[in-house]
């Protein structure tokens, strides 16, 4: 069988995770990293020299090439939707970094464009593939904790003023699309949705308290899930010293607490800890680093993406799944802006 040939658009921090995952997967799958492009040709050349692949002069050159079947979009978030739509119109299958897009208009246009051009798109939510996250979901959805009452995530991270000062896109509405929630907090929000199920309504306060940025550096959100359970999201990038993300899932019969991807508590009335549950702790500083997650965590999602092309089936995180955390974050921003409770269905159907 001929190989699936993959290209990368945007050669910064996260592109190396994609290259690493593709090179690992290529050991056992018919796939190959063939090239990359970046608005800064120098960045593309440096990246391509490191991986021994072709540097395209422009993004258009890469998308016009018959030697590319699929692309990863690893640019600042505000460019994701337009680049993904361009790729779709050239018939390329797409992996787009999180967030898939940063406005409802972009999300809708991207969904339509992928459908019209019959291409597969997956939006990176690499942590859904982690075994402990899947195990927590099985427990919550399968009733191991009884009727669910609360599902919370606390993301109290630290990003220095320099982190924002040294970037021309982080902390801006146009290119980051938001702050502590849209950029750093989206993973925790996505995992909360994956484990607890869909949200019915949100009430939020988002503020810029400590950093000189346009977007929120601190947010507090109250959720009601469609199941009737309640939840809390706290997100900040500005508290010292910063802490790993904490999840709290509480049912009538039991509680699971997680620190990042680690179980730190599993208590169910009248039962011992299940034999497959191991308690471990997160790196105390991991959540404070933009590259604090494990590089290899992209491998299962990219594996699923390439299998979906080879097997002609939807990926586990398709456009509809990928947009869920973004839709929720946009509703949170709307609630904070208006000072009102936002009903998710009304928000989705607004004119
Ligand atoms: N999944 C994760 O855990 C994770 C972690 C970090 C970043 N990200 C996401 O990855 C994306 C990139 O983040 P990063 O930290 O790698 O940023 P970065 O600033 O390190 O790199 C961005 C690269 O894109 C290039 N670029 C800018 N505009 C472009 C355009 N229009 N076309 C082509 N190239 C362009 C820049 O020159 C730069 O090389 C963001 O959307 C971010 O949210 C995801």
Image (tube, rainbow, N blue to C red):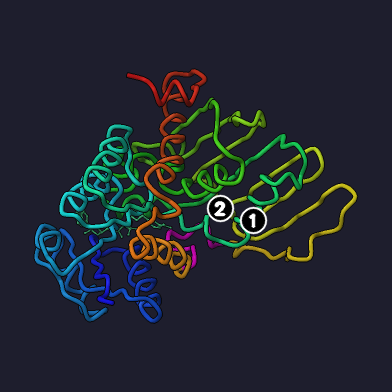
Residue bearing mark 2: 242
The residue stretch that appears in magenta = 285-294
Residue bearing mark 1: 259
Q: Residues within 10 Å of mark 1 (few under 14, many from 20)?
A: many
Q: Nearer the viewer, residue 298 or 161?
A: 298
Residue 288 lies within the magenta run: yes
317 relative to 220 in the view: left or right: left
The residue depicted at 50 percent of the width and 22 percent of the height is 343
The residue depicted at 35 percent of the width and 67 percent of the height is 18
Q: Nearer the viewer, mark 2 or mark 1?
A: 1
Element carrying mark 2:
loop
* Residue 43 appears in view: no
Rendered location of residue 295, percent (x, y): 44, 68
* Residue 134 appears in view: yes
71 relative to 90 in the view: left or right: right
174 relative to 99 in the view: left or right: left
View quadrant of ligand 1: bottom left
Q: Quadrant of residue 223?
A: top right
Q: Give the distance between the C-alpha atoms of the residues marked 2 and 1, in whole angstroms.
A: 13 Å
Image height of 37 relative to 116, above or below: below
Quarter of the N terminus within the rendering: bottom left
Rendered location of residue 216, percent (x, y): 42, 37
Q: Nearer the viewer, residue 264 or 198?
A: 198
| Most frequent secondary structure within the magenta stretch | loop
Quarter of the C terminus within the rendering: top left
Rendered location of residue 168, percent (x, y): 25, 50
Q: Residues within 10 Å of mark 2 (few under 14, many from 20)?
A: some
């Amino acid at each position: 069988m001929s190989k699936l040939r993959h290209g990368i658009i945007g050669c910064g921090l996260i592109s190396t995770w994609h290259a690493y995952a593709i090179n690992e997967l290529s050991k056992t799958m018919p796939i190959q990293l063939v090239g990359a492009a970046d608005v800064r040709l120098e960045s593309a050349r440096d990246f391509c020299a490191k991986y021994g692949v072709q540097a395209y002069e422009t993004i258009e050159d890469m998308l016009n090439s018959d030697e590319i079947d699929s692309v990863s979009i690893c640019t600042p978030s505000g460019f994701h939707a337009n680049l993904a739509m361009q790729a779709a119109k050239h018939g390329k299958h797409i992996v787009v970094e999180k967030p898939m897009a940063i406005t409802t208009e972009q999300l809708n246009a991207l969904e339509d464009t992928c459908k019209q051009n019959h291409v597969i798109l997956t939006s990176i939510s690499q942590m859904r593939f982690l075994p402990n996250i899947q195990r927590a979901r099985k427990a919550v959805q399968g009733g191991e904790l009884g009727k669910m009452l609360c599902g919370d995530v606390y993301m109290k991270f630290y990003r220095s003023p320099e982190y924002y000062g040294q970037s021309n896109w982080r902390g801006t509405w146009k290119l980051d699309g938001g702050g502590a929630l849209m950029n750093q907090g989206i993973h925790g929000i996505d995992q909360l949705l994956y484990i607890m199920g869909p949200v019915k309504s949100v009430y939020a306060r988002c503020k810029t308290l400590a950093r000189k940025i346009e977007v929120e550096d601190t947010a507090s959100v109250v959720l009601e899930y469609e199941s009737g359970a309640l939840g809390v999201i706290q997100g900040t990038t500005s508290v010292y010293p910063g802490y790993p993300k904490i999840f709290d899932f509480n049912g009538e019969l039991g509680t699971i607490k997680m620190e990042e991807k680690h179980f730190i508590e599993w208590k169910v009335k009248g039962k011992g800890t299940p034999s497959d549950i191991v308690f471990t702790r997160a790196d105390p500083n991991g959540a404070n680093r933009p590259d604090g997650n494990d590089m290899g965590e992209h491998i299962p999602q990219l594996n699923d993406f390439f299998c979906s092309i080879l097997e002609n089936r939807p990926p586990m995180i398709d456009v509809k799944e990928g947009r869920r955390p973004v839709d929720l974050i946009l509703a949170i921003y709307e609630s904070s802006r208006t000072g009102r409770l936002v009903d998710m269905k009304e928000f989705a159907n607004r004119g």
